[in-house]
Image (cartoon, rainbow, N blue to C red):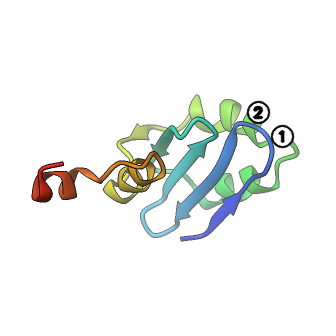
């Protein structure tokens, strides 16, 4: 999946899966939101926007249907917080 990392603003990273038309947005507060369907052009414009947060708020958050983030995204967020993903918690009881 193409990924773009941002060093300023509230958005830290976006990932896009063109086959599934799936966009995942990670924020500086570790929150992850996902949208589907999202046209590839919207992802590309987000990556080129002078102010990605404003573009996100105006074109994605208001216009695209939100979905539950992929399990991989949830697991990455839990690892970033030092927690085990739910599947490992179930397996090891922690």
- Residue 52 vs 14, above or below: the answer is above
Q: Determine whether the residue tagged by mark 1 lies in a helix, strand or loop.
A: loop
Left or right of residue 36, residue 63 in this image: right
Q: Within 10 Å of the Cα at label 2, are there few (<14), some (14-19), or many (20+) other Cα atoms? A: some
List the residue tagged with mark 2.
54
Pick whichever, 71 or 60, lies toward us. Answer: 71
Image mark for residue 62: none
Give the percent coordinates (x, y) of residue 79. 41, 54
Extreme residue toward the right, this view = 50
Pick whichever, 82 or 78, lies toward us. Answer: 82
User: Residue, x 11% and y 59% (percent of image)?
Assistant: 91
List the residue tagged with mark 1.
51
**Total numbered labels placed on residues in the image:** 2
Give the percent coordinates (x, y) of residue 77. 44, 49
User: Residue, x 75% and y 56% (percent of image)?
Assistant: 47
User: Residue, x 47% and y 45% (percent of image)?
Assistant: 35
Pick whichever, 82 or 19, lies toward us. Answer: 82
Q: Determine whether the residue tagged by mark 2 lies in a helix, strand or loop.
A: helix
Q: Within 10 Å of the Cα at label 1, are there few (<14), some (14-19), or many (20+) other Cα atoms? A: few
Give the percent coordinates (x, y) of residue 71. 31, 55
User: Residue, x 13% and y 57% (percent of image)?
Assistant: 92
- Quadrant assignment, res 15: bottom right
- Residue 69 vs 57, above or below: the answer is below
Left or right of residue 41, residue 90 in this image: left
Give the percent coordinates (x, y) of residue 2. 60, 69
- Quadrant assignment, res 68: top left
Cβ atoms under marks 1 and 2 closer than 8 Å: yes
In three-dimensional space, the C-alpha distance between marks 1 and 2, rounded to whole angstroms, equals 6 Å
Left or right of residue 30, residue 66 in this image: left
């Amino acid at each position: 999946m193409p990924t773009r990392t941002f060093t300023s603003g509230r958005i830290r990273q976006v990932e896009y899966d063109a086959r599934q038309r799936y966009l995942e947005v990670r924020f500086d507060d570790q929150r992850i939101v996902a949208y589907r369907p999202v046209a590839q052009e919207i992802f590309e414009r987000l990556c080129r926007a002078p102010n990605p947060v404003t573009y996100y708020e105006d074109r994605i958050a208001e216009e695209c249907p939100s979905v539950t983030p992929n399990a991989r995204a949830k697991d990455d967020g839990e690892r970033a917080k030092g927690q085990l993903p739910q599947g490992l918690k179930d397996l090891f009881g922690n």
